[in-house]
Image (cartoon, rainbow, N blue to C red):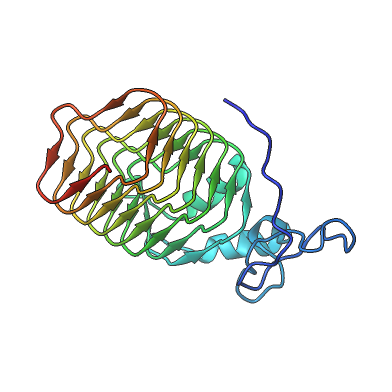
Amino acid sequence: MTSASPARPLTPPQWRHCGHGAVPATEPVGCRGIHVDGHTVCLAHLPEADRTAYLAALSPGADIDHRGTSFTPDLLSQLLTALTDPNTGRLHAGDARFDEATFSGDAPFNRAFFSGDAGFDGATFSGVARFVGATFARVAVFKGATFTDVARFSESTFSGEARFEAATFAGAARFGQVTFSGAARFSGAMFCSGAGFREATFSSQARFGGAKFSRTAQFSRTTFSGEARFG
């Protein structure tokens, strides 16, 4: 499934941003990616030697901040490889900030372990978003995120709040057998294709107020232990 790329906002982000490709008359902000520490550009526009050095210094469990950065499949693969535990083969990130980041291909976060906060606020996933079996130990924020293709979260675990308010799921949203230990917030989310929460477990609040389901929403054998709101 494909769609036109959203227009970039004309106001700069809150963080120190790259600005690559800025044109005062038509594109005053340019690249919105946050500066890599010690540099004045984002990871996508970092010279190859500097990018290699940055990635080599990362290790599993590291905190990362790549807000506003545009990830090609190759660049994302390089980053995730640097964070993968060689003993388990599992991606491990501490605090991970991908707010307003764009992923031009599939985003392979299957089995990822986020031991800190995971921020994907306003992120855009153009390919399949793969979070199958992922573990979010703290807060996971996908507020206002856009999933252009399938969003796969099956069998993942959210130990803290899971925030999907105003997220747009253009493709199927798959949350089967997901465990939500903290509050699960989907208020105002748009499910444009099928939404599957089969055998999911909501141990705390489940908020779907104002959410729109354009097609079938499956909640068979779903467990709600706390307050559930769909109005």
Above or below: residue 203 compared with residue 94:
above
Which residue in the rendered view is the most extreme toward the left?
225
Q: Residue furthest right?
A: 25
Looking at the rendering, which quadrant does residue 218 occupy? top left
Q: Nearer the viewer, residue 104 or 108?
A: 104
Q: Is residue 158 left or right of residue 43?
A: left
Q: Position of residue 208 (x, y in %)?
A: 30, 45
Horizontally, is 153 left or right of 21 in the view?
left
Q: Is residue 203 above or below residue 168?
A: below
Q: Which is more toward the observer, 44 or 123?
A: 123
> What residue sits 56% from the left and 45% below the top?
124
Q: Please, which residue is most extreme toward the bottom here?
A: 38
**In the rendering, at what x and y percent does residue 197 appear?**
25, 33
Callout count: 0
Task: Identify the residue at horizontal 68%, vertical 73% (top origin).
Answer: 39
Across and down, in percent, residue 44 comes to: 67, 55
Q: Is residue 169 left or right of residue 89?
A: right
Single out the residue that lies furthest toward the front. 231
Report the quarter where the C terminus lies.
top left
Using the image as rendered, state which of residue 70 and residue 198 is in the foreground.
Answer: 198
Where the N terminus falls, by quadrant? top right
- Lateral position of residue 23 relative to residue 52, left or right: right
Q: Quadrant of residue 52?
A: bottom right
Name which residue lies at 40% across and 46% down: 188
